[in-house]
């Protein structure tokens, strides 16, 4: 005789405990990089030229008279003789075909330089994109990420306009989502009552103002650590051999600032 009660089946636990839009974002980044691994080199280089953001390309498109400056900068950059010749050849290619590609201000975020690069960005995207997507919804999450990526690219071009090094990676967009999450993730949770327990406390819905954030120790520590590590890694990664190429710290900073300032605007838009 079976005395086991006939209990209802437990609900299925999702494999990925993230909003669908965040899971899709991570999946797209990983899939694109996986496809690039099996593409012929010629196709992959073509994809890189068409989607990566190259500051010198925009400089030449806006001011063709700076062609000599671009060629000089390519020759003056450090590296082996082979690397210098490759940069000079690429600079000559850009001078010969200086057309601007407006989509590259966003499309560069789809490409990554290595598996470590794409997986690191995916981890940060999952960690900080999830609370933003849950709070704002899919389209506002996407809007913050896209505008932050474009802002990071714009600041990178503004700071290093003669560079012929292609900018790739989702870091600027991820930095924007990270900054957006800071506006509410570190907000102290108000007690529902004197005897309330953690699971009875209401979830904060109001964004913290900048003065409130500056008085929030957790938020200030997080912002300080992010800023210092971003600057140090961006300036020292290449000299110390931690990366094969320079880290675009300026793109990260541009995306972070825009995401920080943009969240209150899109948050109010969604609550009308």
Image (tube, grey):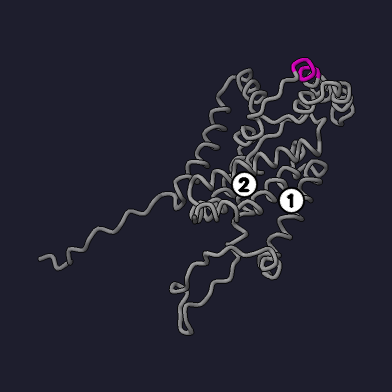
- Residue corresponding to mark 2: 174
Where does residue 55 sit, x and y in percent of width and height? 76, 31
Residue 271 seen from this side: yes
Which one is nearer the viewer's eye here, 180 or 119? 180
- Residue corresponding to mark 1: 230
Q: In this view, does 194 lie to the left or right of 250?
A: left
Secondary structure category for the residue under label 2: helix
* The image quarter in which residue 53 lies: top right
Query: Residue sitting at 55 percent across and 65 percent down?
Result: 206
On whether residue 93 falls in the magenta region, the answer is yes
On whether residue 74 falls in the magenta region, the answer is no
**Looking at this rendering, what residue extends furthest in the bottom direction?**
194
Which one is nearer the viewer's eye here, 168 or 161? 161
Where does residue 162 sit, x and y in percent of width and height? 82, 30
Q: Nearer the viewer, mark 1 or mark 2?
A: 2
Secondary structure category for the residue under label 1: helix
Residue 185 circle label? none
Q: What stretch is highlighted in magenta?
A: 92-97
Q: Is residue 134 above or below residue 158?
A: below
Query: Residue sitting at 52 percent across and 67 percent down?
Result: 204
Q: Crowding near pointer 1: few (<14 within 10 Å), some, many (20+)?
A: some
């Amino acid at each position: 005789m079976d005395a086991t009660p006939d209990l209802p089946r437990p609900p299925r636990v999702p494999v990925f405990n993230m909003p669908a839009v965040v899971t899709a974002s991570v999946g797209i980044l990983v899939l694109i990089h996986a496809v690039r691994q099996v593409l012929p080199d010629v196709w992959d280089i073509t994809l890189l030229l068409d989607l990566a953001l190259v500051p010198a390309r925009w400089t030449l498109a806006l001011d063709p008279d700076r062609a000599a400056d671009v060629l000089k900068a390519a020759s003056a950059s450090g590296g082996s003789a082979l690397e210098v010749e490759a940069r000079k050849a690429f600079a000559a290619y850009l001078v010969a075909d200086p057309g601007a590609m407006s989509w590259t201000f966003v499309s560069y975020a789809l490409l990554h330089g290595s598996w470590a690069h794409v997986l690191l960005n995916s981890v940060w995207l999952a960690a900080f994109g999830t609370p933003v997507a849950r709070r704002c919804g899919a389209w506002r999450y996407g809007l913050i990420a896209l505008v932050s990526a474009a802002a990071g690219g714009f600041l990178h071009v503004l700071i290093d306009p003669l560079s012929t090094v292609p900018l790739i990676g989702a870091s600027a967009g991820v930095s924007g989502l990270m900054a957006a999450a800071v506006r509410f993730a570190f907000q102290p949770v108000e007690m529902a009552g004197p005897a309330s327990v953690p699971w009875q406390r209401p979830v904060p819905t109001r964004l913290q103002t900048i003065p409130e954030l500056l008085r929030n120790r957790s938020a200030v520590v997080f912002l300080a650590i992010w800023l210092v590590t971003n600057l140090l890694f961006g300036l020292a990664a290449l000299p110390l051999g931690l990366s094969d190429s320079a880290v675009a710290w300026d793109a990260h900073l541009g995306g972070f600032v825009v995401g920080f300032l943009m969240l209150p605007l899109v948050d109010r838009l969604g609550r009308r």
